[in-house]
């Protein structure tokens, strides 16, 4: 990436399974150096936004916002997560 460039990744997923036993695994872009496969199940939606800004040749900033809403038939479940990463290199 060149300094001052911005990369933006967006993901939206709609899922519906019978139970945890029939879960679906999702692979999404994540913060640099992080690998994660998320299991989703029951009935719900998942949204993700990941932004990476290279401020200079030795400094970059990444931000990830996630939202998961799921209905398991008894109650609704909502998860919101924020991830921030600062990379310094020479």
Image: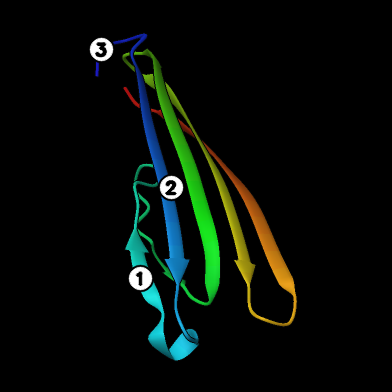
**The N terminus lies in quadrant:** top left
Q: CA distance from mark 2 to mark 1?
A: 14 Å
Helix, strand or loop at label 1? It is strand
- In this rendering, is residue 56 above or below 47? above
**Tag 2 near tag 1, CB within 8 Å:** no
**Tag 3 near tag 2, CB within 8 Å:** no
In the image, 46 versus 30, the foreground residue is 46
Residue 25: which numbered mark, if any? Answer: 1
Residue 2: which numbered mark, if any? Answer: 3
Local crowd at mark 3 within 10 Å, few (<14), some, or many (≥20)? few
Q: Earlier in the sequence, mark 2 or mark 1?
A: 2
- Residue occupying the far right of the picture: 75
- Residue occupying the far left of the picture: 1
Residue found at x 44% / y 29% = 51
Q: Is residue 64 left or right of residue 71?
A: left
In the image, 67 versus 30, the foreground residue is 67
Residue found at x 37% / y 52% = 34
Helix, strand or loop at label 3? It is loop
- In this rendering, is residue 75 above or below 50? below
In the image, 9 versus 89, the foreground residue is 9
Residue found at x 51% / y 55% = 46
Q: Position of residue 58 (x, y in %)?
A: 35, 18
Q: CA distance from mark 3 to mark 2?
A: 28 Å
Q: Earlier in the sequence, mark 1 or mark 3?
A: 3
Residue 12: which numbered mark, if any? Answer: 2
Residue 53: which numbered mark, if any? Answer: none
Q: Position of residue 23 (x, y in %)?
A: 41, 80
Tag nearer the camera, 1 or 3 = 1
């Amino acid at each position: 990436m060149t300094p001052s460039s911005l990369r933006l990744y967006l993901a939206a997923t709609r899922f519906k399974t019978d139970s945890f036993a029939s879960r679906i695994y999702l692979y999404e872009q994540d913060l640099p150096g992080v690998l994660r496969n998320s299991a989703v199940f029951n009935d719900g939606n998942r949204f993700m936004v990941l932004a990476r800004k290279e401020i200079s040749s030795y400094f970059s900033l990444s931000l990830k916002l996630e939202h998961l809403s799921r209905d398991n038939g008894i109650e609704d479940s909502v998860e919101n997560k924020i991830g921030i990463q600062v990379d310094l290199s020479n």
